Image (cartoon, helix red, strand yellow):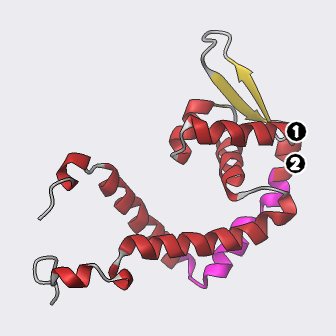
Amino acid sequence: METLDTTPDEDFLRLDRQICFSLHAATRAFNGVYRAALKELGLTYPQYLVMLALWEHGELPVKGIGERLKLDSGTLSPLLKRLEAAGYVERRRSTEDERSVTARVTDSGAALREKALGVPRRIASATGMSLEEIRALRAQLDELTARLDGVDPGDLSACG
């Protein structure tokens, strides 16, 4: 059985052996499917993720949205501005702390939720996987993410 210790270094440099490339290719494929599914809603995939967080949790601090979606404020702020301009989201400064901004779904944003209800089912169907397979894959990816988030970057800097 092949292991990390028994696999030749040269084999690790093959593109078809890179888990990062497989994840990248899957992400690109998902983005294409989402682009088509979200077209009728007028949302991009990142905007859809913001709306999912707000539909699920109601009013959230912008910082909380960023933490949930793993987005920095430089990426999140323009998304929120576009969603606000479209009338789906409203941002407010906190009365207790001027530095804190919250976002909430407007009535138009709530109506958009009704239109979006079929999107997850269409995406799941597009995968060709059973619900059990999807849940298992998501659990594996969540575990992988947690492990990678826990890696000390200093441990990766030493070469051969």
Magenta residues? Answer: 113-131
- Amino acid type at mark 2: Ala
Q: Position of residue 125 (x, y in %)?
A: 67, 79
Residue found at the far top of this picture: 96
Give coordinates of residue 50: x percent, y percent: 67, 46
Tag 1, which secondary structure? Answer: helix
Residue that label 1 marks: 107
When asked about the image quadrant of residue 60, the answer is top right
Residue 99 in the figure: left or right of residue 103: left
Is 87 left or right of 156, judged from the image as shown? Answer: right
- Check whether the beta carbons of the residues at disc 1 and disc 2 lie within 8 A of each other: yes
The residue shown at (84%, 59%) is: 41
SS class, disc 2: helix
In the image as oriented, which residue stretches furthest toward the bottom?
1
Kindly identify the residue that appears in the image at 17 percent across and 79 percent down. 9
Q: Does the magenta stretch include residue 111?
A: no
Q: Mark 2 points at which residue?
A: 111
Compared to 102, does 51 lie above or below? below
Residue lying at 72% horizontally and 74% vertically, measured from the top left: 122
Q: In which quarter of the image is the N terminus?
A: bottom left
Residue toward you, 153 or 109: 153
Residue 7 position, x and y percent, is: 16, 84
Foreground residue among 7 and 101:
7
Q: Residue 148: percent from the left, percent from the top?
A: 32, 56
Label 2 crowd bin: few (<14), some (14–19), many (20+), radius 10 Å:
few
Predominant SS of the magenta segment: helix
What's the amino acid at mark 1?
Asp
Mark 1 and mark 2: Cα distance apart in space: 6 Å
